[in-house]
Amino acid sequence: MRMPTIAQKENHIDEWFTDDVSFNTLYPAQIQKLADLHWTPLKVAKNAAEFLVPEDGAKVLDIGSGSGKFCIAASYYKPNGLFYGVEQRKDLLDCAIEAEYNLNLNNLSFIYGNFTQLDFTQFDHFYFYNSFQENIEGTEKIDYKIQHSLSLYNYYNSYLFNQLEKMPVGTRVVTYHTWDDQMPSGYHIVNSEFDKLLKFWMRA
């Protein structure tokens, strides 16, 4: 199945969100194959978005947005939020932008680059689906177009930890498949779902 025409997309956007199989057909076959392991399920995106947009206009950053599935789904479920995805793989970023276009959504943006180049204070809340994990030896990689190493894994975790530590009281973070020690001590779990794989954090 390929993407619908422009006329079809404007009239049938809800059909893409009936289930993950339908949604994933927005992407080329090679991107679809990565979905089960690397892209956020729709149910996870919906619940995360509900928590991350406590007020209109909340700016949410997806750290390592891949094909853009979380941002796209979240922007659909929470049209009163503003979603940003940062991704260092240009081919994945292009897929995200194309999918965004075909759904005609206007409350999200994708940023090409490494998350360490961003000023976290420009955002209110954060989503993190352990995008650093592929740097660990023996884990499944999205591809080999970027460098992988344990030193990068440690550097990225340290950088994220330090940036979150600088954020103000009330900052919200949702993590998926992420170790608790990757979060600063000032953040506390206020809820968890999906066998505790999805965790909702707030800075007190």
Image (spheres, helix red, strand yellow):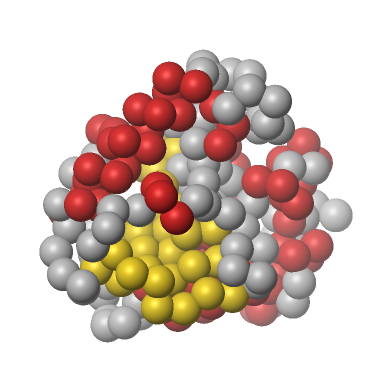
Residue 47 percent coordinates (x, y): 53, 77
Up the image or down, 150 lies above or below 128; here it is: above
Residue 23 located left or right of residue 190: right
Q: Is residue 105 in view?
A: no
Q: Residue at x 17, y 57 (%)?
A: 167
Residue 59 located left or right of residue 9: left
Q: Residue at x 40, y 29 (%)?
A: 154
Quadrant that contains the N terminus: bottom right
Residue 163 percent coordinates (x, y): 22, 46
Q: Residue at x 23, y 62 (%)?
A: 186
Q: Is residue 198 in view?
A: yes
> Residue extending furthest right?
1
Residue 140 located left or right of residue 40: right
Residue 197 lies in quadrant: bottom right
In the image, 136 versus 113, the foreground residue is 136
Residue 25 located left or right of residue 133: right
Q: Residue at x 35, y 59 (%)?
A: 126
Up the image or down, 100 lies above or below 133; here it is: below
Up the image or down, 116 lies above or below 193; here it is: above
Residue 116 lies in quadrant: top left
Residue 22 percent coordinates (x, y): 78, 65
Residue 158 percent coordinates (x, y): 31, 36
Quadrant that contains the C terminus: bottom left
How many discs mark residues in the rendered view? Answer: 0
